[in-house]
Image (cartoon, rainbow, N blue to C red):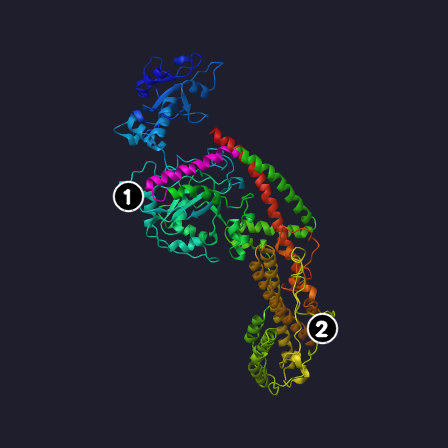
C-alpha cells in the first residue's frame, strides 16, 4: 500500500490517479464505477470544483464526497477516492486507517493524513522544535515551490479549538432551527489581564511570523492598523472608579503591551479564536471593541441574541454601536441584540441600580451563570505570560496561542463529565427553587399574580431600549423627608402676608442647635454653645416678637425628665457587648443612650408653649416646627440605623475574628465609638418625639414615630448574614421600616417588598429551569460537534 500511494502521489488528479480502499488497492466490484471506463482521467463535474482564477489547475481544491485531500511528506494532494461497498465492508474510517490514512474527521471525511507525515512531524517536533504551522508551511513549499501561497492554508482562527457546547449553526446546530429561541443565545464574557505584559523588541524588523492570526490572538498588522486609525475617547464609568478605566491613559514606555484583552464563552470558559488583543496603554474601549467584534463573527450565522458580561458594561455599552458604526475596520450586524451584563462579583461594586439592570440573575437566557469564569483562565495563562515577556512578538503569540488551545482542548475532552455533574446538581437546585417560589406564589391573590407577571414581561421586553425598566427587581423605597429638604421647601413656598420668609430657616437653625447641644453635652463641651444660642435667642425678636435676655433659663418643659416611659434608665453602660465573646453577644448587640434633659432651652414652641409667643401666625409657626421636628426625627433614625448596622458588621467580621490582643482592642474601640453615635442619635430622636407630643401631633404620626425603648437599640447580626439559621421569627424594631411613606393604604408600602421578593424568587426559579434545559440541549450539541 505505501508503494501504491507513492506512485499515486507523484501524479495529480488530472492524470487519472485514483485511490481504491479495500481489496489491497484493487477496485471494488460491488461499487459502481466512477471512472470513464477507459482508464483515462476521471471526468469531473463542474459543480465539484471551486474554480479560482489565480489557482493552478493541479492545486484546485476539489469539492465532493468522491475526492480526498491527502497530506503526505511529499506535499498536499487531491485524489479521487473509491471505497469498498461490499456487504461485509468495514466503515469508511476503518478502511482509511487500514490504508494508513488518518481521517481529519470521522463523519464524512474529506481530508486525511498519511501515517508517514504524522511520524515525520513528531520527529521534527521533538528534535527540531518545529511547530505545526511551520511544518505545514514546509509542506506547502514541497507541494509547489513556485506558488506555495496557492496551496490551501488556514484562515483566521482556523487553528484554534472552540467550545463543543456553544451553539454554532452548521456545526452542532441545524441552521434551519429557530435560532431566535433563547436556548441559542450566545453568552460571552470580556476581561483584561494586566499580567500578560510584553517588552519592546530590539530588532522588530527581523521577526518572522509563522501563524499570525490563525489561533486565538488577532492578526498583528490588521490590528495595528485599526489601533492607529481609531481615535480613543476616554470615558469614565458613571458609577465607579475602575482599574481598567484608570489605566487607559497610563504611560508605559518600556512596554510594547501592558496586557491582553480576551473574549471567552461565559458558561464553560473557552477562549474565542481570533479575539485576543494586546493593550497599548490600559484596557481601552477601542481594544475591547476589536476583541468583541471578532468574537461575534465566529460561527454566529443566524444567531442574533447575545449576552455580554463585562465589568464596566454600564458605561462600555452606552456608545458601542456608535463606535462600531464610525469604524471602517470592525463590524457588528445591526440585527444583533447585545444584552449588557456585569459579572456577579463586580456588580455589587457599582451603584445600586446596576444590580437590577445588569446582574446575571435578571437576564433571560443566561441560565445559572456568574460570568467570572474568565478569571480561572487568567490564572493558568499567567504562568506562561511571565515567560513570554521578553520573547519576540511572533514567538510570544505562538506561545500564548498554544496555551489557550491546550486550555480549550482540556475542557473539550472533559466536557461530558462536566455536563453530567452540572445536570445532577442543577436538577436538585431547580427543584428547591420551584418549591420555594411555589410557597410564596400561593400566598398571592390572582390579581397580584397577574399584575406582577405582566410587569416582569414588560421589563424583559423593553430592557434593551430602556434599562430602567428592570428597576422593578429592586425596592424603590421612597426616602422620608429630611430637615434640609423641608427647609428648602419652606423657603421656596411663598409665605402668606405677615409671615417672615426666613421663619422656617430660623426654626431649622434652632433644631440644629439642639442637636449640637446634645452632641456637646456628651463630649462635655457645653461652653461652645453660648454665643450661638445667644444669637438665636436674639433673632427670635425678628421672627416671633419674643423678647428675652440671653442666657436666662426659660423654664424648659422637659427639665428633669431623666427616665424613659418604661421606667428603665437609659444609662451609659454597654449592655452585653463585652460580656461573653463566645456566647450570644454577637447576636444581640445592645447600645444605650443617656437622657439629656436639662440643656439650655431655646425659644421654640415645643419648649415654651404657644402661649409664650406674641406672633400673629402662631398656627403657621406651630405647623412649621412640627414638620421640621418630624424631618429631624427621620434624620436621627437614619443615622441610628446606619450606626447599628456598622456595629453589627464590625462585631461579626472583626471582633469575633481578631487573632491578636491589639487587633481586638482596636475593634472594641471602634465599637465604643459607634456606641457614642448611637447614644447621640437616640437622644436627638427622643427630643424630637417629645416635641411632637407637645406640638399636638396626630395619633397617626405618633403611631409611626413611637417612643424609643432600650430594647429597640439592639440588632441581630442575622440581618447581614444570609446564611444565619433560627431567625425565621425574628423581627426588626419598628423604626427599620419608618423610611417609607404611610399616607397610602396600610399595607401598600409593604407590598413593594413582597413584589420584589416574589420577582427575585421567580428569577431564581426561572434561571435554574433555564440551566436544566440548556444542559439537556448541550448534551446533543456536544455530540453533534464531535460528529462534525
Disc 1 residue crowd, few under 14, some 14–19, many 20+, Cα 10 Å: few
The answer to whether residue 306 is left or right of residue 113 is: right
Is 176 on the left-hand or right-hand side of 277?
A: right
The local crowd at label 2, few if under 14, some if 14 to 19, many if 20 or more residues have their Cα within 10 Å, is some
Q: Residue at x 57, y 56 (%)?
A: 660
Q: Position of residue 631 (x, y in %)?
A: 61, 70
Mark 1 and mark 2: span between their CA atoms? 84 Å
Per the rendering, the mark at residue 724 is none
Tell me the residue at 53%/46% (across/down): 370
Does dot 2 land on a helix, a strand or a loop? loop
**Closest to the observer, 126 or 774:** 126
What residue sits right under mark 2 in the picture?
A: 563
Camera-nearest residue between 448 and 541: 541
User: Eyeballing the image, is 61 above or below 710?
Assistant: above
Left or right, 433 with respect to 45, comes to right
Is residue 132 or residue 388 the one in the foreground? 388
Residue 621 falls within the magenta-colored stretch: no
The quarter in which the N terminus is drawn is top left
Q: Which residue is tagged 1?
A: 204
Is residue 751 among the parts visible in the rendering? yes
Picture layout, residue 241 above or below residue 211: below
| Residue 263: % across, % down | 44, 44
Q: Quick one: which residue is furthest to the front in this view?
A: 661
Q: Main secondary structure of the magenta part?
A: helix
Which is more foreground, mark 1 or mark 2?
Answer: 2
Q: How many marks?
A: 2
Quarter of the rendering containing residue 386 = top left
- Where residue 669 sits: x, y (%)? 58, 64
What's drawn in magenta, residue-wise?
388-415
Mark found first going from the N terminus, 1 or 2: 1
Secondary structure found at label 1: helix
Q: Residue furthest top?
A: 29
Amino acid at each position: 500500500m505505501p508503494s501504491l500511494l507513492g506512485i499515486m502521489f507523484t501524479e495529480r488528479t488530472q492524470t487519472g490517479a485514483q485511490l481504491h480502499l479495500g481489496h489491497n488497492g484493487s477496485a471494488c466490484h460491488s461499487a459502481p464505477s466512477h471512472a470513464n471506463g477507459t482508464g483515462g482521467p476521471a471526468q469531473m463535474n463542474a459543480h465539484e470544483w471551486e474554480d479560482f482564477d489565480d489557482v493552478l489547475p493541479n492545486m484546485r481544491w476539489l469539492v465532493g464526497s468522491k475526492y480526498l485531500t491527502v497530506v503526505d511528506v511529499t506535499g498536499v494532494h487531491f485524489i479521487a477516492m473509491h471505497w469498498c461497498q461490499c456487504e461485509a465492508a468495514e466503515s469508511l474510517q476503518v478502511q482509511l486507517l487500514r490504508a494508513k490514512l488518518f481521517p481529519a474527521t470521522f463523519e464524512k471525511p474529506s481530508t486525511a493524513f498519511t501515517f508517514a507525515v504524522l511520524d515525520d512531524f513528531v520527529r521534527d517536533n521533538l528534535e527540531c522544535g518545529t511547530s505545526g504551522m511551520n511544518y505545514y508551511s514546509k509542506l506547502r513549499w514541497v507541494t509547489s515551490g513556485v506558488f506555495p501561497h496557492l496551496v490551501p492554508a488556514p484562515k483566521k482562527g482556523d487553528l484554534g479549538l472552540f467550545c463543543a457546547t456553544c451553539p454554532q449553526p452548521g456545526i452542532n446546530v441545524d441552521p434551519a432551527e429557530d435560532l431566535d429561541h433563547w436556548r441559542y443565545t450566545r453568552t460571552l464574557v470580556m476581561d483584561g489581564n494586566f499580567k500578560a505584559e510584553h517588552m519592546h523588541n530590539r530588532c522588530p524588523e527581523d521577526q518572522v511570523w509563522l501563524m499570525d492570526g490563525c489561533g486565538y490572538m488577532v492578526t498583528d498588522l490588521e490590528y495595528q492598523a485599526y489601533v492607529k486609525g481609531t481615535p480613543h475617547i476616554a470615558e469614565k464609568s458613571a458609577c465607579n472608579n475602575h482599574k481598567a478605566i484608570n489605566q487607559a491613559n497610563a504611560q508605559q514606555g518600556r512596554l510594547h503591551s501592558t496586557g491582553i484583552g480576551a473574549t471567552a464563552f461565559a458558561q464553560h470558559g473557552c477562549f474565542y479564536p481570533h479575539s485576543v488583543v494586546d493593550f497599548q496603554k490600559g484596557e481601552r474601549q477601542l481594544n475591547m471593541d476589536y476583541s468583541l467584534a471578532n468574537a461575534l463573527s465566529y460561527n454566529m450565522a443566524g444567531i442574533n441574541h447575545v449576552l455580554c458580561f463585562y465589568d464596566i458594561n454600564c458605561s462600555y455599552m452606552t456608545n458601542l454601536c456608535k463606535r462600531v458604526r464610525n469604524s471602517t475596520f470592525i463590524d457588528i450586524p445591526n440585527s444583533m441584540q447585545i444584552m449588557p451584563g456585569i459579572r456577579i462579583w463586580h456588580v455589587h461594586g457599582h451603584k445600586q441600580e446596576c444590580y437590577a439592570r445588569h446582574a446575571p440573575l435578571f437576564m433571560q437566557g443566561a441560565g445559572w451563570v456568574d460570568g467570572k469564569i474568565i478569571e480561572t483562565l487568567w490564572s493558568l495563562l499567567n504562568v506562561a505570560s511571565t515567560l513570554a515577556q521578553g520573547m519576540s512578538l511572533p514567538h510570544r503569540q505562538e506561545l500564548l496561542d498554544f496555551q489557550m488551545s491546550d486550555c480549550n482542548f482540556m475542557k473539550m475532552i472533559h466536557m461530558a463529565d462536566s455536563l453530567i455533574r452540572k445536570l445532577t446538581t442543577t436538577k436538585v437546585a431547580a427543584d428547591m427553587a420551584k418549591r420555594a417560589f411555589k410557597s410564596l406564589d400561593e400566598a398571592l391573590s390572582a390579581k397580584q399574580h397577574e399584575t406582577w407577571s405582566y410587569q416582569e414581561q414588560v421589563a424583559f421586553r423593553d430592557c434593551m431600549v430602556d434599562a430602567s425598566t428592570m428597576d422593578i427587581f429592586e425596592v424603590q423605597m421612597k426616602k422620608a423627608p429630611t430637615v434640609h429638604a423641608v427647609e428648602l421647601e419652606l423657603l421656596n413656598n411663598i409665605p402668606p402676608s405677615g409671615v417672615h420668609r426666613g421663619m422656617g430657616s430660623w426654626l431649622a437653625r434652632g433644631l440644629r442647635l439642639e442637636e449640637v447641644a446634645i452632641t456637646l453635652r456628651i463630649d462635655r463641651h457645653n461652653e461652645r454653645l453660648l454665643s450661638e444660642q445667644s444669637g438665636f435667642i436674639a433673632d427670635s425678636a425678628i421672627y416671633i416678637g419674643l423678647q428675652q435676655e440671653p442666657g436666662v433659663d426659660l423654664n424648659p418643659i422637659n427639665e428633669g425628665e431623666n427616665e424613659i416611659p418604661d421606667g428603665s434608665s437609659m444609662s451609659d453602660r454597654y449592655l452585653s457587648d463585652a460580656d461573653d465573646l463566645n456566647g450570644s453577644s454577637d447576636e444581640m448587640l445592645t447600645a444605650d443612650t443617656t437622657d439629656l434633659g436639662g440643656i439650655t432651652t431655646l425659644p421654640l414652641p415645643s419648649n415654651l408653649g404657644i402661649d409664650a409667643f406674641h406672633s400673629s401666625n402662631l398656627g403657621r409657626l406651630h405647623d412649621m416646627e412640627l414638620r421640621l421636628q418630624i424631618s429631624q426625627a427621620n434624620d436621627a433614625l437614619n443615622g441610628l440605623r446606619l450606626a447599628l448596622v456598622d456595629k453589627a458588621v464590625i462585631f461579626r467580621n472583626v471582633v469575633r475574628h481578631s487573632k491578636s490582643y491589639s487587633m481586638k482592642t482596636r475593634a472594641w474601640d471602634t465599637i465604643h465609638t459607634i456606641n457614642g453615635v448611637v447614644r447621640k442619635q437616640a437622644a436627638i430622636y427622643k427630643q424630637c418625639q417629645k416635641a411632637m407630643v407637645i406640638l399636638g401631633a396626630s395619633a397617626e404620626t405618633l403611631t409611626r414615630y413611637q417612643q424609643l425603648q432600650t430594647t429597640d437599640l439592639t440588632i441581630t447580626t442575622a440581618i447581614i448574614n444570609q446564611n444565619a439559621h433560627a431567625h425565621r421569627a425574628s423581627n426588626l424594631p419598628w423604626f427599620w421600616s419608618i423610611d417609607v411613606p404611610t399616607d397610602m393604604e396600610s399595607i401598600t408600602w409593604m407590598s413593594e417588598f413582597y413584589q420584589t421578593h416574589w420577582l427575585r424568587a421567580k428569577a431564581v426559579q426561572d434561571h435554574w429551569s433555564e440551566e436544566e434545559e440548556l444542559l439537556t440541549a448541550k448534551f446533543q450539541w456536544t455530540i453533534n460537534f464531535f460528529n462534525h
